[in-house]
Amino acid sequence: MPAEPVSLATPYRTHTNGELRADDAGTRAKLAGWVHRRRDYGKLIFIDLRDRHGITQVVIDAADAPEAHATASRLRSEYVVAFEGEVARRQPGTENARLPTGDVELQARTVTILNEAKTPPFYLNDPDATIDESLRLKYRYLDIRREAMQRRLLLRSRLVQAIREVHHANGFVEVETPNLIKSTPEGARDFIVPSRLQPGAVYALPQSPQQLKQLLMVAGIDRYFQIARCFRDEDLRGDRQPEFTQLDLEMSFVDEAAVMAFVERMVIEVTRATVPDRPIRETPFPVFTYAQAMERFGSDKPDLRFAMELVDLAPALEGGSGFRVFDETLANGGRVKAIAAPGMAAATRRETDDLTEYARRHGAKGLVHLAVEAGGDLHGPIAKFLSPELQARLVSASGAGEGDLLLIVADTAGVTNDVLGRLRQELGNRLGLADPNELAYCWVHEFPMYQWDADGHRWDATHNPFSGVLPDDEALLTTNAGSLDDRSPDDPAGKARAMQYDIALNGWELGGGSVRIWNPDLLARSFNLQGYTRDQMEERFGAMLEAFQYGAPPHGGIALGIDRWAALLSHQTNIREVMAFPKTQSGTDPMLEAPSAPEPEQYEELGLRFVGVPGRA
Ligand code: ASP
């Protein structure tokens, strides 16, 4: 039997501000909290008293409690105050149906001011106020008093709790890994911490616990998870922060299907526990290969809440279209593809110019737009080059209907898919095609193992350097020259697919993972293709290479971005909204004023010298 939880009552309060109900009328109560709103009618003063649990109305009547009334007349917004008095039903007609406590009020006998407060720099009691974000971050402790922030942090707490419960119920062990480690590359710069005891040496903060969790598999932990803080020094965006939180997990004796099956179940259970009212669009989650996702959605994190898929126009254009750009693109091995934007046929010149500019900004040479008019005729700058039969074929191939706007890109496969994929997402958002409540999870797998790095003359891992190769493609981990040190862009390795799977949610990459290479020789081979010499391998991944010689089980795992997950579950597009104390776009904390110059003695202790920064040598 679980013990009764400790009561929320304290010496300052018998109830929280979210607790009193009509049944409590006639009892005595003590309440404490912040002054949310104060209305002064002379003899009667009304205070909306707030804490995290809710709001309760307190009334102070000069006739009943003259001393309390005198104190209450000094109260201002955000004062911290305690009241004591009798719970009463509100006058009929004055109940507040929007508050759970709205049937009652506390008729205060005594008022104690526990702390005064300066006038806050922004209103805390107006949910619709737009407040400058830098002000919100500087006074985050006030910002968090606002209901919307409280709601989001509570959701995040529920999310993490559900994650823990599901993992514990499935035989996972929560293990903490250190933050002062050696570089674990995940494609970003490291944050480094100078060591005092080892002058001239630095720790790196983990970009992820990747190597450590794999070592935990060698250590026989079998199923590991952690709510892990990760640090990546890269440029900030709405879905990126220099430090962020991952649900990191790893499992032994698994293949791809086993990891995906557990993660999918976990994600469903966690979603249902955290946001029971939000529908999951489709289970089992749809699974696409990377190639399919790029072909159909132009994205490896497709938003499946709406269709507007990319269509290949090549079959319709067969035999020549009479429009040079299309014909030459196809002749040169490029692609001509389209999306049909519903109801956008009436787009103004300015709107289509805007879309063309957007396509150019993302690397396309241009964007063809054709409005589908009544009877299926196409209208647009290039319509005159296209015969009526071809127009009919294009309309039927693209599945466009009357009133739609066909947007066509003719370019290399990469550019065509990427640009149309971005346009699809952008227009999906603009046109409100997605049901905002729906949660559309999906899997994307069979990613290319490597991509060619022309500068480094090597095969960079597309995800992390430890990902395994699909068994069918193992023989491809080689070069044309035979020597792994002699790499070139058309090596067989470029065709190898990884045992890598990403999970996407509503157009965001929620997480990614892989079954790892657990054979030390194959691992060394893959590192070699990635451009590491033997010495560099030893220097960077020595512990791992050595550990794998002591019996590494087959293993694989994944990491999911908790900030992203919490943001999407709370209808946010910026992860700062679900982080208590995030950094600004320029990586600063305006509240604590971090980062800041070290103390002079820290320079000495750490043997540090800043070169070229005035005043910090
Ligand atoms: N370490 C990877 C990442 O941070 C996740 C994984 O492969 O488990 O993206």
Image (cartoon, rainbow, N blue to C red):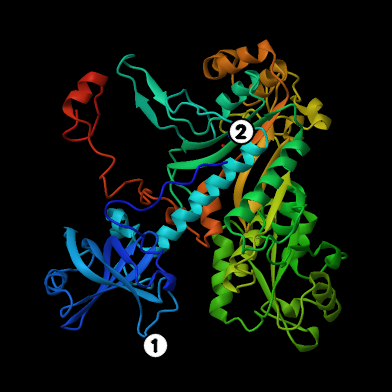
Examine the image and state in which quarter residue 233 appears.
top left
Looking at the picture, tell me which residue is in the foreground, 255 or 457: 255
Q: Quadrant of the N terminus?
A: top right
With respect to residue 201, does 79 lie above or below?
Answer: below
The residue at 35%/80% (across/down) is: 90
Q: Which mark is residue 464?
A: 2
Q: Position of residue 613 (x, y in %)?
A: 22, 34
Look at the numbered disc 2 and give the secondary structure of its residue. loop
Q: Which mark is residue 93?
A: 1
Q: Is residue 127 left or right of residue 351?
A: left
Using the numbered discs, state the Cα–Cα distance from disc 1 to disc 2 in whole angstroms: 63 Å
Q: Which is closer to the viewer, label 1 or label 2?
A: 1
Density class for disc 1 (Cα within 10 Å; few <14, some 14-19, many ≥20) is few
Q: Amino acid at mark 1?
A: Gly
Q: Position of residue 286 (x, y in %)?
A: 76, 53
Q: Is residue 375 left or right of residue 238?
A: right
Q: Is residue 462 left or right of residue 144?
A: right
